[in-house]
Image (cartoon, rainbow, N blue to C red):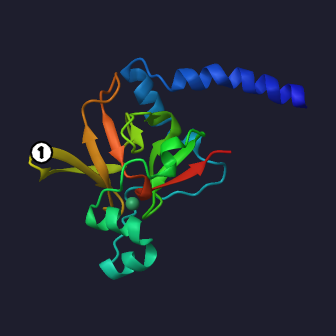
Amino acid sequence: MKRRTFLVGLAAAPLLARAAQPVDLKDIKRMQSDWKTFLAPGTAVPSPTEALKLSKEEWRKRLPPQAYGVLREENTERAGTSPLNNEKRPGVFVCAGCGLPLFTSEMKFESGTGWPSFFTAIPGAFEMKKDFYLIYPRTEYHCARCGGHHGHLFDDGPPPTNQRWCNNGVALRFIPKG
Ligand SMILES: [Zn+2]
């Protein structure tokens, strides 16, 4: 039994290493279409079309203060404060507001910024708008289901997408696959 676990572990390691470094846009397409394979068995998740609309007061009751500040008032958490920076297990990152799946663990990369960062996202998870808080325009993105603010999209990420989805950790909840 022990030996079997060891062998399975060995077999899985190269696969994981390869998955973490997509070489072309076909890899990205595959990651986007295979995202459900990262869900823990039996996990029920909502879809972007099941809109969740709550009043400010309802959100305030539902969310811890820091998550409320980010998701509903577009605050930014302090860099390096999220435990999800170091989350490396296989699984799915969902919206802390409404549970919508947003990213899988294989879409994550270490950006060195102190915020959880991803080079692509699950299709349909987000909507965008431009904001001008820092004088130059930035692309703000928010959850397609509940409208909660998550972060900003930059174009200095790793190839082949060159995208860096810079996400507040407090706006995410991680569901490990195992
Ligand atoms: Zn949401």
- Residue 162 in view (yes/no): yes
Number of callouts: 1
Residue located 59% across and 46% down the image: 39
Residue 55 appears in the figure: no
Image quarter (top left, top right, bottom left or bottom right) of the C terminus: top right
Give the residue at the far bottom of this rendering: 57
Q: In the image, is residue 78 above or below residue 111? A: below
Residue found 41% across the figure and 28% down from its top? 28
x, y (%) of residue 174? 54, 51
Relative horizontal placement of residue 144, taking residue 47 as reference (left or right): left
Q: Residue furthest right?
A: 1
Q: Is 30 rendered above or below residue 54?
A: above
For the residue with label 1, is its CB less than 8 Å from the closest atom of ligand 1? no
Q: Quadrant of residue 165?
A: top left
Instruction: Check disc 1 and report its element: helix, strand or loop.
Output: strand
Q: Position of residue 173 (x, y in %)?
A: 50, 56
Hey, what amino acid is under mark 1? Answer: Pro
Q: In which quarter of the image is ligand 1?
A: bottom left
Q: Where is residue 102 in the image (x, y as percent from the top left)?
A: 43, 48
Q: Reply above or below: 170 against 124.
A: below
Q: In which quarter of the image is the N terminus?
A: top right
Q: Which residue is under mark 1?
A: 137
Instruction: Please tell me which residue lies in front, 85 or 3.
Output: 85
Q: Is residue 85 left or right of residue 139?
A: right
| Crowd rating for badge 1 (residues with CA inside 10 Å; few <14, some 14–19, many 20+) | few
Q: Residue at x 31, y 78 (%)?
A: 56
